[in-house]
Structures are given as C-alpha cells and as structure tokens.
Image: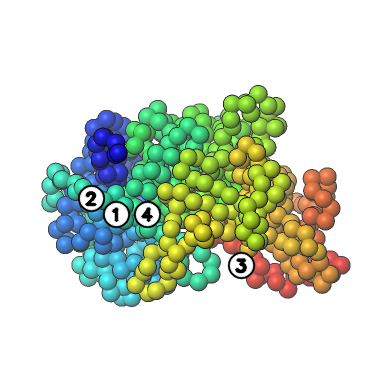
Amino acid sequence: MLGAMQDHPLLIWRLIEFAARNHPTTEVVSRRVEGDLHRYDYQSAVLRCRKVANALDALGIARSERVATLAWNGYRHFELYYGVSGSARVLHTINPRLPPEQIAWIVNDAEDRAVCFDLTFLPIIRAIAAQCPTVKHWIALCDSDRLPADTGLAGLISYEAWIAPQAEEYTWPDFDEKTAAALCYTSGTTGNPKGVLYSHRSTVLHAYGSALPDMVNVSARDCILPVVPMFHVNAWGVPYVAPMVGAKLVFPGAALDGKSIYELLESEKATAAAGVPTVWLALLNHVDSIGGRFSTLQRTLIGGSACPPAMIGRFLAYGVTVQHGWGMTEMSPLGTISNLKLAQLALPAEQQRRFLEKQGRAVFGVDLKIVDDAGRELPWDGKATGDLLVRGPWIVSRYFEGALGGAMGSALVDGWFPTGDVASIDPDGFMQITDRSKDVIKSGGEWISSIDVENIAMAHPAVAMAACIAVPHPKWDERPLLVVVRKPGTEVTPRDILDFFAGKVAKWQVPDDVVFVDSIPLGATGKMLKTRLRETFRNHRLPGA
C-alpha cells in the first residue's frame, strides 16, 4: 500500500518562488565588480530569474544542455543559479582560478552552449574562446555601457541587454526531480578534473539538511555572507539554503581581502559567514590590526581544509562561534559540522573545545564509516583511524561522462564513496580528519598526521601559515618537514618553532627541520598545494640525515 500524499517533485525553482512569496522584502545585497553595492529583494530577484529562463528559451538552448559561469558571488550569478537550473538546463560553475588550458578542457568536456562571465575574467575568455567550439553564446555579466568596445569576441552581449527584452512571467516546468541541475568539476592536482553532476533532488535535500540546527543552523532571522565562492561547489549550498529559510544574503563580489570582508560584515549586520581558513586568517589579522570587534557576527562556518585550533580560539575571543565543517565536491558538499550535544554543554570549556576542533557529526542523509586497508570496518572509539567512506542521497554515485572521456564512471566501492581522507570517529559520532591519505607521513613504520603538526605550529604567535610535508630519510623512510610563513614584523628561528612542540606531541612526531618561505602555494579553492611543496623540497637535506 502506498501513502496518499501529494507528489510534488523537489525542484530548485520552488526555492526562489517560495522566498519571493513568503519573504518578499528580504534583501539580497551584492558588492559588484564595479565596486558599488547593489540591493534588491527576493520579490525582485525572482522576476529576473524568470527573465533569464525566457532568455535561454530565446537562445534555443535545450533542456539538459549546459550553461557555464565564470563569476564571483553576486546577484547576477545568483539569478543564473535559478534561471538556468529552474528551466531544466544545467548550471555549470567553473573555477576561474584554474589555469586557462584546464578551463578550456572543462568547457569542452561539458560541451557548454553558453558561457556567462564577470568582466574580471575577460582575459581568460579571450584566451580560451577559440578553443571552445561548442560555445555559441558569450555573455558578460555587466550593464550594456560597461561592455568594452573591443573584446575580440564575436557576438558578445551584456547580461542586462540579454535579459532586458524578456518577460517577467514564466511558467516553470515540472519534471523528474532526479533531473540534472548543476555541474561542478573537482580541482584535483593530478590528471584531468572530474565532473560531479548534481540533481534537483540532491540539491534540495542538501539544502534541507544544511539548514538544520545541528548543521549550518540558519533561519529568517539570519544575514549570511558566503565568502566561499559560488563557482566552487555552489558556495557550499548557501544560495539554496538562504531562500529556503528566508535569510538575508550578502555577496562579497571579488573583494575578498580582510578589510573589505570586515566592512561588509559590519555594514550589513551579518550574523553568519562561510569560508576557508585562508580567508578568515586575513580577516582576523585585519580586525586585530585595527583593534576592531564583530558587532553582529555570531558564527562562521569554516571548511575546505582543516581549521587550526588557534583560529577557533581567535574567533571565540571575539565572541564568534566556529562551526568546523567537512565535505567534498562529491558530497554537494556538506558532510559533517561540529556542534555540541546537550550533554557536552555541561563540560568544562576546554573539553568542549576539543569537540569543536573536530570536523564534527554527520547530519541525517550522510552515513560515515572508517575501514582498514582490507576494507574491514573499524570501531567508533576515537582511537582507530582508517580510510573514510560516505554514502547518502546527495553524494556522488558516478562521475559525469564528459565529451573528452575524462570521467571515471562509477565512483563507489560496494555502495560507498571513498573520500581519500584518513579519519577517526569517537563514540559520540564526532569525526576527525587526521590526514589526506596522500599527505600522511610514514616514519619508521609509524604514522604522523601532518594536520596535527600544522595545528601546533599555527598556534605559535609568530607563525602566519604552516604546512607539514614528508621528505625522504635514509633511516626512517620519511620524516616531517615544516614549511612556515612568518607573521609580518616577527623574528623567529627554526629552533624557536621546534621548541614550541615540546610536550605537545611525542618526540618522534616533532618535525626534523623548519624552512621559512614568503608564501605557501594555494590551489584554486584556497587549499595548500602540498604536491608543489613536496616537489620544491624533494631534495631538502634534513639535519643529521
């Protein structure tokens, strides 16, 4: 016997229509590439989303064809999120920080029919246009009078001129909720990227899960500033979650320095923000430098890479709670977030903090397990570490089968997705990433967590950033080398850094050496490029080796 309830497919366009009807005057604020602030509300936004859908119809772009974006976080990008996916096309967000040749590969693999881009990225578009034969329409996200006279692109049109003649009325189609909605390629450091194809169903379910109190915990009483880019795994789902709950949205555009982010947080009275540790480091350093404070910010979601415990402490000192999260492009992306349970609220602050430093607990919809090298499941005792596997309704089952044959087909092992992370899980379900499987250091048969080493180094008052990598050793196979960026105006020696480890880890886990650099290379999503560091220091001679 089946239930007797109505059957309405979970479709992305329902989110923006819900927001327009139930939260019509809630603001969406954007710092534009031009530098000014743009304001409108959900009621105005939905009208322009419908115009986008009509404009796509006028171009003759068929259902399930891909429309690409190279754009910062802003209202026009937001409109494409709904106008493209809502009309049954596939929104393909591309990371503009990738090398141009890789962007061209991705465009061709996806067989994009149109590319919408911020003028910031016009040099990239000029470099790749001749290499992208499937793209028939180039659309610059700007006003008509901002379009450069000589772009070198035949048929280039401004976004505003493109949607201007279109009607504000549009009948959104109903279709199978498993229909593809958005496409995002991984930013792997080896081989060609792989496409992850999200469905309407997976996206809406992910938004439901993200909004829960034990996850991002957002509501109509919030003002959210997503610093995490919309071109990277859908800004962690924030552009879908905010309309679902009626939260105010503030988009930072291209200005991601600490000063600009702080001024926007304060002027728009943001209560929540989301971003990677490198962005928050710049923000905290700016606030420290001016003796500032956060007048409305209550919490920040930090993910993308492990958040150093020292950063959690710095935010707490300003009265801001850190929600330490973990996820992947293949997971839409949220998997776990560290929020305390009722019983843990009675614990001393230091014990609470140890829980908050972990990557957190899963939400309903995400199953976790850790396994050993033979695939045997390991206990949730907080001690055993193993390869982390996940499954759930918003987790990838197979990669997009692109035109260039770069995809890999099935992504699962016995129904579970192998994340490539090494982790432990405690009896309360708190998961802690101990390393990436490719970054863990094996020294004399013992494993050393590069993340643990980095977290200790980041607590040193003279350290701005630190990365721990393995270098060859004639006796121990591998030993840890610490690569450090000093804070401006500080003086510190390698011995000062190594002495700081005393009593914090076992002696054999302390790095053998410290090297100072001006900067640590970052990838397209803000993660440290340890592959590049390993290449740079592959011949580094350790003391006594």
| Badge 4 element | strand
Residue 331 located left or right of residue 489: left
Say which amino acid is labelled 4.
Answer: Tyr
Pointer 4 residue: 198
For the residues labelled 1 and 2, the Cα–Cα distance comes to 7 Å
- Of mark 2 and mark 4, the one earlier in the sequence is 2
- How far is disc 3 from disc 4 in space, using C-alphas? 31 Å
What residue type is disc 2 on? Answer: Phe
Please name the residue that numbered disc 3 is placed on.
532
Q: CA distance from mark 4 to mark 1?
A: 9 Å
User: Which residue type does callout 1 highlight?
Assistant: Thr
Task: Say if mark 3 contacts mark 2, CB within 8 Å.
Answer: no
Q: Secondary structure at mark 1?
A: loop
Residue marked by disc 2: 175
Q: Residue at x 49, y 51 (%)?
A: 391
Tell us which disc is closer to us: 4 or 1. Answer: 1
Res. 179 mark: 1
- Vertical order, 361 against 136 (above or below): above
Contact? badges 1 and 2 (CB < 8 Å)? yes
Q: CA distance from mark 1 to mark 3?
A: 39 Å
